[in-house]
Amino acid sequence: MADLTLALDIGGTKIAAGLVDPDGALVASRRLPTPADDVGGDAIWDVVAELIAQMTAGTVVSGVGIASAGPIHLPTGTVSPINITAWRDFPIRDRVSATLPGLPVRLGGDGLCMALGEHWCGAGRGAAFLLGMVVSTGVGGGLVLDGAPYDGRTGNAGHVGHVVVDQDGELCSCGGYGCVETIAAGPRMTRWARAHGWAGPPGADAKELAQAAAAGDSAALQAFTRGARAVAAMIASVGAVCDLDLVVIGGGVAQSGALLFDPLREQLARYARLDFIADLRVLPAQLGGDAGLIGAAALLGG
């Protein structure tokens, strides 16, 4: 099969590889767990190399797109994912280029690639000014502005999880305070609900919290409402700055459906009062876990 792009999606829990055709269809994919950090950076690379070998065996590809957890540094092609501490300034672009010499290799943040995937083949088709975001164990995002991916100076534009929505808020994993991630990320919502009366089982996560909220648990419902309000405030701010017309939200917390989206839309109507963003739409993502791979392929011009 001709004109296939090899796509890689590198995260803290899994590393995925896929083959994407010119129409954005994911024709094959494989996933392996990301090794623990204590095995070292080269062992993590070995998983990437194994997936590359598996996906290109007997297959000709025209280029490689890489979606990686960040921060990334586009000028050098290196990545320093917060959730892969064994990789600091890891030369992922050069490593892939050396493995597949002569092919174009493009790198992008995982949030940007999610946005690109949804823009190309998912809920964001036709939107010229799009924020794609993931609300899960963290809050991430990426921007498509005037129909094109917006990387920013270093490749890290779109880190909307670190928009400050509470000036007196909690310490965030980024080192700052009051970021939307401190309120709306799944583990933070779960922790807040426990502190306010939710008696969830040990080890319960956002999925169990959503089940409790759907069953009417007051603290669980308040946790979702509180998280939705923080996300709405952030969207209103980013929407005003970037003149957005659409926001697409995926991730584990977003899979709770109306528990998140109903209060989010209600609060967004309260915050987004300027005429040019008053009709800003918010939709659930359509591509699920495949968005990063499809968006990585889109880095090469999909």
Image (cartoon, grey):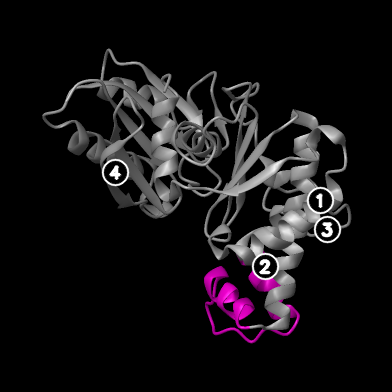
| Residue indicated by mark 1 | 269
Is there a contact, CB below 8 Å, between mark 1 and mark 2?
no
Q: Tell me the SS state at disc 4.
A: helix
Q: Tell me the SS state at disc 3.
A: loop
Identify the residue at horizontal 53%, vertical 37% (top origin): 80
- Of labels 3 and 2, earlier in sequence is 3
Question: Nearest the camera: 268 or 50?
Answer: 268
Query: Between marks 4 and 1, how big is the CA–CA gap?
Result: 45 Å
Q: Please say if 84 is above or below 99.
A: below
| Residue indicated by mark 2 | 189
Q: Please say if 142 is above or below 177.
A: above
The magenta segment is 187-215
Query: Between marks 4 and 2, how big is the CA–CA gap?
Result: 33 Å
Q: Is residue 111 left or right of residue 293?
A: right
Residue farthest to the top, as pictured: 102
Is there a contact, CB below 8 Å, between mark 1 and mark 3?
no
- Of labels 1 and 2, earlier in sequence is 2
Q: Amino acid at mark 1?
A: Ala
Is there a contact, CB below 8 Å, between mark 4 and mark 2?
no
Q: Amino acid at mark 2?
A: Met
Q: Amino acid at mark 4?
A: Val
In the drawing, what numbered circle is on residue 52? none
- Of labels 1 and 3, earlier in sequence is 3
Question: Nearest the camera: 80 or 207?
Answer: 207
Q: Tell me the SS state at disc 1.
A: helix
| Residue indicated by mark 4 | 47
